[in-house]
C-alpha cells in the first residue's frame, strides 16, 4: 500500500526531529581557569598578579574540562569587573584549539582601564554551552602612567623643595603632570615623612603639618613599585610670622656724598638677617641695619631685609626706595668715533637736564681753556669729554662726566658694498646693492668705522663689468632686470680721498613664467604620440627639455614623448635657468580598470547580473558577436557567453574579457542570506524543480505552519517584504510531483 504523505504540521516537525535523533549533544564540565607560565619569559612567570603597560601586556591562562566538546566548539576567556562581577564580562581571548587552551593556554592582554585586586576570569564553551566557575581573585593593573609624578602648591607647576606655612595656615599639594581628564581616574598613596597617610587617595592633599611629603599612583602592592611614579618631595615648614619691617628712615632722597642708615624693626640676636637691593642679596649685609652711601654710583633702588630663625617663618619686609635727589643725565649728541681732516672742524656737543649746569671740556684728560659751553668745536685729534656740574636745586655741586668722543685723522679710507637683503644667485628677481661700511685707516693700520659720520658726504659712482653707469651716483643701486646682471663696483670720493670697493656679482632670475602643456598624460605604447609644447617663443634661445632631471633634447621647440617620466623645459635667461612647470607622463596601468563583481559572472538561468566598471574615462561593452550592448560604466547580462569590455583611460584602451555562466543548479541550497547584496538572497532551485508545471514546492516554518505551496516555483522566496525576527531561523521544505516526494530538508536563513 502507498505510504500516506504527512500533512499535519506537528507530524511534519516530528519527522524532522526524528531525522536528527541520532545526533546527541555532548556535555562538558569546565574547571576554573588558572594562571599559566608565559613561554616567552625566562623562569616561572605564572601567578595571580598582572602588571601590564604599553611595553608589555602578554599573559596566559589554561583551562581543563571533563567530557568532549562538539565539533566547531570555541572556548572563550572572559574577565569580570574589579569586584569579580560577571554581569558585563569582557572577552579576553577565544580559541577552537583544545590543545592550545590547555598548553600553553589562552594568550590574552588586559584592557587599558584595568586597575584593581578583585578581578576574576572564567571560561565559556559554545558547543555545548557551558561556563566554568570563576578563578581566584587577580591583582590586575594596567600601568598607563609610569613616569615620576610632580606635585606643587595648588598645582601651579613649581618645584619649591620647601614651603612655609605660617600662623596655622595650610597648603594644598596637587599632582600637576597628569591630564585633567585622567587625574581622578587613578588611586594615589600620599606619604608623610616616609609613612603612608591612611585615607588620602585623591590627587591633592591639604596639610599644615611640619613634615616631608610625596605621592605615588596606587597600582596595588605588587605593581606600584614597578611603575616608579614616586613624585618629588616637598618639605613643609610651619611657624609664626615675625612681622618684620624697616623703620622709617629720616630721608629717602640723598645727594651725592650723603648716607642714610636703614634699621630692622626686629633685633632678636638669635635670628638671621639679610639685606637686599632691587631683589639681589647684598654681600656681607647680614646685620639688623644697613647704611646707604650716596657717594657709591648706582646706590638708588629698593631696599628690603629678610629675617629667618627657629620657630618663625622666613619673611621679607616691604621695600624702602632710596633716590638720588641730585641725579641728572648728560647725553652725548655726536658719534663716539669721528674723523677730522686737515683744516676741518668737528663740533662736539652734549644735552643735559641738570639744574643750572656749568660745563668744562677736556682733551686727553686735560681741561681746555675757555671750553665752558654745552658744545665745543674741535680742530685736532684726541679724546674729548665734558664735565657737567649742577649748581642749583637741592644737591648743588654734583658733577657728571659725559661719554668720550675720539677724533682721528686717517691716512686713507676703505669701503665695502653688500646686498641690502637676502640674495641667492638665480633665485632673486630683484636686489639692492648698498654701501655697508666705511672705515678710516689710521697711521698704525688700525681702522675706525665712520659709516654713520661720512657715508652721506662721499660722492659715488657705480660701475658694472668695469663700465661707468650713467646717473648712478647714490650710495645704493636698485637692480630689477636680468639684463642688469654683472659684476658691480663702487667708487667714492671725499676731498682728496678716493675709495674703491671689491666687486659684487649680481645674477637675477627672470620674473617671467615658463609654461609647458601636453596632448596627453598617459603613455600607452611605443607607437602612441604625446607632444609637449610651450607658448614661449624658443627661436634663437638656449633651452633644454629634461626627463627626470636629465637632458633629452635641446633643439626641438616641441618634444615628442617616447617613454614615461617627469618632463620640464629649462630656458637660459641671462645666465640663469628659467624652469617650467613639471608634467608627469605615466605608463598605462591596466589594473586601474576594475570590475564589480570581479572574475567570472555566475547567476541562475532566467535571472540577470549587472557588472560595473570603474577607473576609466569611457566604456564600450560587446557580446561574442562583437555587437555593442552598452556604452556606459555598467552592463547587464542575461545569457551565458564570453563578453568584452573596451575601457578608455584618456587616449589609451584597456580590454577585459568577461566570462558569463549560469549557476550550477544540481543541488538544493540549505542556507540563504537575504541581505540585499545581490548574492544568495533567494532560495534558488535547480531547473529540474523550478518553473516546472508538474512540480509542487511547499515551505513550513519551525512551528509547522505552511508558508508557500505553489506549482511552478519561480525562485523568488523570500520576497523583499519577508521579515526574520530572529537570527539563524530554520524552515522546512518538501518538493514533490503528482507521484512522489522528490526532495525534502531544511533551509537556514542567516541575516
Image (cartoon, rainbow, N blue to C red):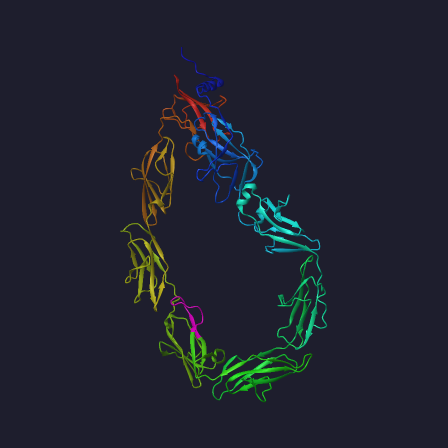
Which image quadrant: the N terminus? top left
| Residue at the image point whose x is 56% and y is 43% from the top | 219
Question: Residue 202: image x %, image y %?
Answer: 62, 46
In the shown orientation, is residue 338 left or right of residue 543? right
Q: Quadrant of residue 136?
A: top right
With respect to residue 26, does 185 lie above or below?
Answer: below
In the shown orientation, is residue 481 left or right of residue 147? left
| Residue at the image point whose x is 42% and y is 75% from the top | 417
| Residue at the image point whose x is 35% and y is 54% from the top | 584
Residue that lies at the very extreme toward the top in this rendered image: 1
Q: Which residues are magenta?
A: 418-434
Residue that lies at the very extreme toward the left in this rendered image: 527
In the shown orientation, is residue 687 left or right of residue 401? left
**Which secondary structure type mostly characterizes the magenta part of the structure?**
loop
Question: Residue 507: image x %, image y %?
Answer: 37, 70
Nearer-the-camera pick, 4 or 213: 213
Q: Is residue 515 visible?
A: yes
In the shown orientation, is residue 156 left or right of residue 739? right
Nearer-the-camera pick, 697 or 584: 584
With respect to residue 594, does 237 lie above or below?
Answer: below
Q: Is residue 81 visible?
A: no
How many marks can you see?
0
Magenta stretch holds residue 188: no
Question: Residue 334: image x %, image y %?
Answer: 54, 80
Residue that lies at the very extreme toward the front in this rendered image: 270
Magenta stretch holds residue 430: yes
Nearer-the-camera pick, 104 or 428: 104
Question: Residue 257: image x %, image y %?
Answer: 66, 77
Amino acid at each position: 500500500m502507498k505510504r500516506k504523505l504527512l500533512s499535519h504540521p506537528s507530524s511534519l516537525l516530528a519527522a524532522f526531529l526524528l531525522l536528527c535523533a541520532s545526533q546527541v549533544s555532548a556535555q562538558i564540565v569546565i574547571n576554573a581557569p588558572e594562571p599559566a607560565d608565559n613561554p616567552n619569559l625566562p623562569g616561572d612567570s605564572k601567578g595571580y598578579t598582572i602588571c601590564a603597560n604599553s611595553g608589555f601586556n602578554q599573559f596566559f591562562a589554561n583551562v581543563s574540562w571533563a567530557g568532549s566538546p562538539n565539533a566547531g566548539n570555541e572556548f572563550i576567556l572572559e574577565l569580570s569587573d574589579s569586584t569579580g562581577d560577571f554581569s558585563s564580562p569582557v572577552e579576553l581571548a577565544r580559541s577552537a584549539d583544545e590543545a592550545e587552551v590547555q598548553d600553553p593556554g589562552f594568550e590574552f592582554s588586559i584592557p587599558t582601564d584595568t586597575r584593581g585586586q578583585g578581578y576574576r576570569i572564567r571560561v565559556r564553551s559554545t558547543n555545548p554551552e557551558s561556563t566554568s566557575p570563576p578563578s581566584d581573585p587577580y591583582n590586575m593593573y594596567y600601568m598607563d602612567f609610569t613616569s615620576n609624578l610632580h606635585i606643587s602648591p595648588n598645582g601651579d607647576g613649581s618645584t619649591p623643595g620647601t614651603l612655609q606655612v605660617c600662623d596655622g595656615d595650610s597648603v594644598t599639594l596637587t599632582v600637576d603632570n597628569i591630564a585633567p581628564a585622567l587625574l581622578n581616574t587613578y588611586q594615589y598613596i600620599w606619604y608623610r615623612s616616609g609613612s603612608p597617610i591612611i585615607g588620602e587617595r585623591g590627587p591633592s592633599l591639604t596639610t599644615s603639618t611640619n613634615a616631608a611629603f610625596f605621592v605615588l599612583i596606587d597600582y596595588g602592592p605588587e605593581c606600584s613599585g614597578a611603575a616608579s611614579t614616586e613624585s618629588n618631595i616637598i618639605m613643609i615648614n610651619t611657624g609664626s610670622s615675625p612681622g618684620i619691617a624697616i623703620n622709617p628712615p629720616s630721608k629717602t632722597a640723598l645727594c651725592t656724598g650723603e648716607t642714610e642708615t636703614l634699621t630692622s624693626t626686629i633685633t632678636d640676636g638669635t635670628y638671621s638677617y639679610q639685606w637686599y637691593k632691587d631683589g639681589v642679596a647684598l654681600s656681607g649685609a647680614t646685620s639688623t641695619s644697613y647704611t646707604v652711601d650716596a657717594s657709591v654710583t648706582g646706590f638708588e633702588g629698593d631696599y628690603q631685609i629678610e629675617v629667618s630663625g627657629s620657630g618663625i617663618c622666613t619673611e621679607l619686609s616691604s621695600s624702602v626706595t632710596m633716590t638720588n635727589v641730585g641725579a641728572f643725565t648728560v647725553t652725548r649728541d655726536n658719534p663716539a668715533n669721528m674723523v677730522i681732516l686737515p683744516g676741518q672742524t668737528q663740533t662736539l656737543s652734549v644735552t643735559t637736564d641738570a639744574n643750572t649746569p656749568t660745563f668744562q671740556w677736556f682733551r686727553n684728560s686735560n681741561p681746555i681753556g675757555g671750553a665752558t659751553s654745552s658744545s665745543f668745536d674741535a680742530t685736532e685729534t684726541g679724546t674729548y669729554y665734558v664735565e657737567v656740574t649742577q649748581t642749583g636745586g637741592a644737591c648743588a655741586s654734583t658733577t657728571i662726566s659725559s661719554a668720550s668722543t675720539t677724533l682721528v685723522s686717517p691716512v686713507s679710507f676703505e669701503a665695502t658694498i653688500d646686498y641690502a637683503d637676502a640674495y641667492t644667485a638665480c633665485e632673486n628677481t630683484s636686489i639692492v646693492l648698498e654701501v655697508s661700511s666705511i672705515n678710516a685707516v689710521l697711521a698704525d693700520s688700525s681702522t675706525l668705522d665712520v659709516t654713520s659720520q661720512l657715508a652721506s658726504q662721499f660722492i659715488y659712482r657705480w660701475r658694472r663689468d668695469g663700465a661707468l653707469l650713467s646717473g648712478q651716483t647714490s650710495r645704493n643701486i636698485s637692480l630689477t632686470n636680468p639684463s642688469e646682471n654683472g659684476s658691480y663696483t663702487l667708487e667714492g670720493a671725499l676731498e682728496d680721498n678716493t675709495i674703491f670697493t671689491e666687486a659684487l656679482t649680481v645674477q637675477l632670475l627672470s620674473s617671467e613664467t615658463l609654461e609647458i602643456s601636453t596632448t596627453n598624460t598617459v603613455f600607452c605604447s611605443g607607437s602612441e604620440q604625446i607632444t609637449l609644447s610651450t607658448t614661449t617663443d624658443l627661436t634663437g634661445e638656449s633651452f633644454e627639455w629634461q626627463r627626470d632631471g636629465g637632458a633629452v633634447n635641446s633643439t626641438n621647440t616641441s618634444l615628442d614623448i617616447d617613454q614615461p617620466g617627469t618632463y620640464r623645459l629649462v630656458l637660459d635667461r641671462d645666465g640663469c635657468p628659467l624652469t617650467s612647470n613639471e608634467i608627469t607622463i605615466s605608463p598605462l596601468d591596466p589594473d586601474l580598470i576594475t570590475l564589480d563583481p570581479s572574475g567570472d559572472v555566475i547567476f541562475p538561468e532566467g535571472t540577470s547580473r549587472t557588472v560595473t566598471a570603474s577607473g576609466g574615462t569611457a566604456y564600450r561593452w560587446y557580446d561574442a558577436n562583437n555587437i555593442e550592448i552598452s556604452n556606459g560604466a555598467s552592463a547587464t547580462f542575461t545569457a551565458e557567453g564570453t563578453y568584452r569590455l573596451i575601457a578608455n583611460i584618456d587616449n589609451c584602451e584597456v580590454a577585459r574579457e568577461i566570462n558569463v555562466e549560469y549557476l550550477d543548479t544540481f543541488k538544493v541550497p540549505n542556507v540563504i542570506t537575504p541581505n540585499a547584496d545581490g548574492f544568495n538572497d533567494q532560495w534558488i532551485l535547480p531547473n529540474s524543480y523550478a518553473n516546472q508545471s508538474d512540480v509542487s514546492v511547499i515551505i513550513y516554518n519551525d512551528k509547522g505552519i505552511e508558508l508557500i505551496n505553489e506549482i511552478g516555483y519561480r525562485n523568488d522566496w523570500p520576497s523583499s517584504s519577508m521579515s526574520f525576527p530572529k537570527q539563524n531561523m530554520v524552515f522546512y521544505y518538501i518538493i514533490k510531483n503528482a507521484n512522489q516526494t522528490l526532495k525534502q530538508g531544511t533551509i537556514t536563513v542567516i541575516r
